[in-house]
Image (cartoon, grey):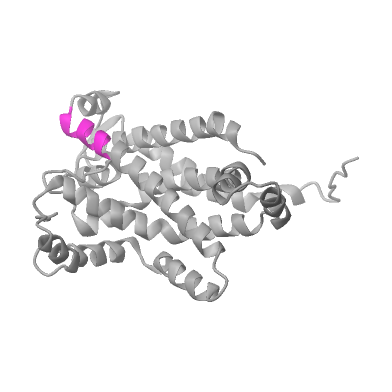
Amino acid sequence: MHKRVTFDSKILPYLLVAPQVLITIVFFIWPSYQAIWQSLILEDAFGGNTRFVWFRNFEKLFEDDAYWHAMRVTVVFSILVAGIGLAASLLLAVMTDRVVRGTEVYRTFLVWPYAVAPAVAAVLWGFLFNPSVGIISYALRKIQIDFNYVLNGEQALLVVIFAACWNQFSYNFLFFLAGLQSIPRSLIEAAAIDGAGPSRRFWTIVFPLLSPTGFFLLVINVLYAFFGTFGVVDALTKGGPAKATEILVFKLYNDGFRGQDLGGSAAQSVILMLVIVALTVVQFRFIERRVHY
């Protein structure tokens, strides 16, 4: 029988939830309303001349080839950032979980990147791949590979992906390592006694038990790829060269704050919000079915 919490004062429950409701209204509902309203109007940079145009901003956006290019770049970028980030972090967590000596040292070094801001991570990778003085570019030239992300769009996207993944490694690593250490050792030892090898034990026991952690990190990494990588793109390539790394969140900023297209940028923000909501619903509706709690 479940016990139900009761309050002597009828107003106390409302006071307890009031801070969270206020935060939701101020930081989500009100900005969302403002974005939707601005996407339906045309106004100058100073807000002095405003005209209601219904869905003209959206129509103009869907007719823009640059917007669809940014959409394609974002899809490729998000899939690679989330996929590579999760796979590499899981591999590092599994390897660290098997370390007997010096475990704290390994964990410390693998956690450090999380303390680095995205813009700083972008600058670091920019130095490493710098065509003139970068040590990685120098090593690639030694093996006859001409790597210049400043001029080559595909190479620039690759560098941005590396920087974004590296900056998120530590976050994923911490959760995967915590999930691995929460798995009862008796289950793995029983499988080993039954003759299951390390690979079979991982895929039949460890991986299914890690599915709640993996599902949580999948949602977080998709959101990170869409929004949290803005600092990486802005500091490293600013969407170039030739808009090869212009993802949706950076195009929104570029059109709104630099191009002063307030209505168009608001329409982009509404579409981006709908895309994120749709992806989250799909993940919870279909992918969560495979999660074993």
Rendered position, 104 above or below 209:
below
Q: Is residue 283 magenta?
A: no
Instruction: Name the residue at 74% across, 48% down.
Output: 13
In percent of width and height, residue 108 lies at 48, 73
Instruction: Name the residue at 64% across, 39% down.
Output: 292
- In this orientation, does residue 182 appear? yes
Relative side of 55 to 36, left or right = left
**Which is the main secondary structure of the residues drawn in magenta?**
helix
- Picture quadrant of residue 126: bottom left
Q: Which residues are magenta?
A: 64-73
In percent of width and height, residue 262 lies at 24, 40
Q: Residue furthest right?
A: 1
In percent of width and height, residue 36 lies at 37, 33
- In this orientation, does residue 233 appear? no
Q: Nearer the viewer, residue 15 or 285?
A: 285
Q: Is residue 70 magenta?
A: yes
Instruction: Name the residue at 20% across, 40% down.
Output: 261
